[in-house]
Image (cartoon, helix red, strand yellow):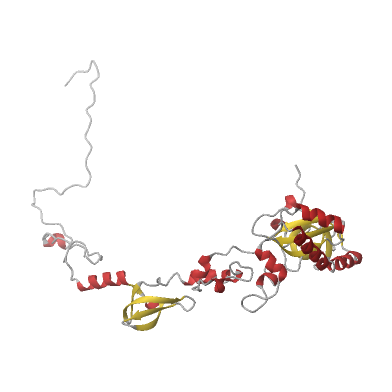
Amino acid sequence: MAVMTAGRVVGVRFHDVGKLYHFDASAYPDSQLGDFVIVETSRGRQLGQIMGIIPPDRADMANLKPIKRLATARDLLMNKLYEAKEVEALIACREAAAEMGDLEGVKFIKAQYNYDGSMLSFLYTSEELANTNKLRKRLGQQFRVRVDMRRIGARDAAKMLGEYGACGGPRCCSTHLTDFSPISIKMAKEQGISLNPSEITGMCGRLRCCLIYEYEQYVEAKKGLPRINKMVGTPHGEGKVIDLNPLMGTATVIVEETRYEVHRDDIQPLAELHALQQKAAQPYAKEGGGVCDCGARIRPERPAEEEKPAAEVGGEHPARPPDEKPPSGRRRPRRRKRPQQPGSAEN
């Protein structure tokens, strides 16, 4: 069975800071970066912009959808026209939800029109699931378009609203983060950040996305440092670790009510230091043969060699009696007796 392969795969983005979705652009080989295209998605036809050329081996070729066509000037003009109506639609949605009164705890964030106005989506956040069918039908009759109610998370809502973060600068999610990474409280502990909620939570009420930026560097830098409250040996004496500076590779050690900033190369575990000191203070328990208590191996003494004749030591053979034959290095084989033939007489 032949497998169809796409000759040209592009990454299309539908929002200013959003994910890239892969599409087959084989039918439009002249398309370039920055061109606007019309594609078919699960939410209908959408207007997107080509932001990159994707190698075929990195794309999901089985679920790849083709580009419908290149966007025209009329498509871009209609998209701008319906974007201007989104604020009015959001206000109408909030007023309708307030009149119904059964959507408490639901916060509507944004209204989004399709590029040609054929679909209107309302994005909202809520702690619990909410039934928005009545509101959807009412808004559908009011705007005479297909209405979609979509629930999003707190981070997605903060990304759409933009504004400024707790650090005083623009929010990372609305400037350059195209995807959200999982954040845990362990990342703040590894970096020595205060666990005060005001210090580690963002404007969305979740843990700050920036906690992951330097997490791996701190984990790697702390591998050669002792833990806090551990007793260690230093050039200034034995002390207790009270603070760490992983990026500098130092630890703050208190020795007899005096604080010292000690580098990791000068820090020695106390148990290992005591063991070495005890071994150094003990004399060798075994002299000569055997194994030393300090762990070093000592060769056993060789036994005294027996005295050999001077002639043998010098490499000459000792004198032999005159009637003694010298030993032969080769042994003569025995002669076999021939069997007597029948009828033969002995002499």
Instruction: Tell me how many marks there are.
Output: 0
Q: Residue at x 86, y 59 (%)?
A: 143
Task: List x then y, in percent, for residue 294.
Answer: 24, 67
Eyeballing the image, is 141 above or below 184?
above
Instruction: Answer left or right for 265 relative to 286.
Output: right
Task: List x then y, in percent, for residue 20.
Answer: 73, 62
Dividing the picture into quarters, in which one does residue 97 lie? bottom right
Nearer-the-camera pick, 93 or 119: 93
Instruction: Answer left or right for 222 relative to 122.
Output: left
Kindly tell me whether residue 13 is visible in this rendering. Answer: no
Which image quadrant: the C terminus?
top left
Q: Residue at x 23, y 21 (%)?
A: 340
Task: List x then y, in percent, for residue 6.
Answer: 78, 54
Q: Residue at x 49, y 69 (%)?
A: 189
Nearer-the-camera pick, 230 or 27: 230
Kindly tell me whether residue 133 is visible in this rendering. Answer: yes
Nearer-the-camera pick, 202 or 32: 202
Task: List x then y, in percent, for residue 19.
Answer: 71, 63
Dividing the picture into quarters, in which one does residue 318 lie? bottom left
Work out which residue is located at the far bottom of the displayed protein and give it.
Answer: 258
Work out which residue is located at the far right of the displayed protein and give it.
Answer: 74
Which image quadrant: the N terminus?
top right
Eyeballing the image, is 347 above or below 101?
above
Nearer-the-camera pick, 207 or 68: 207
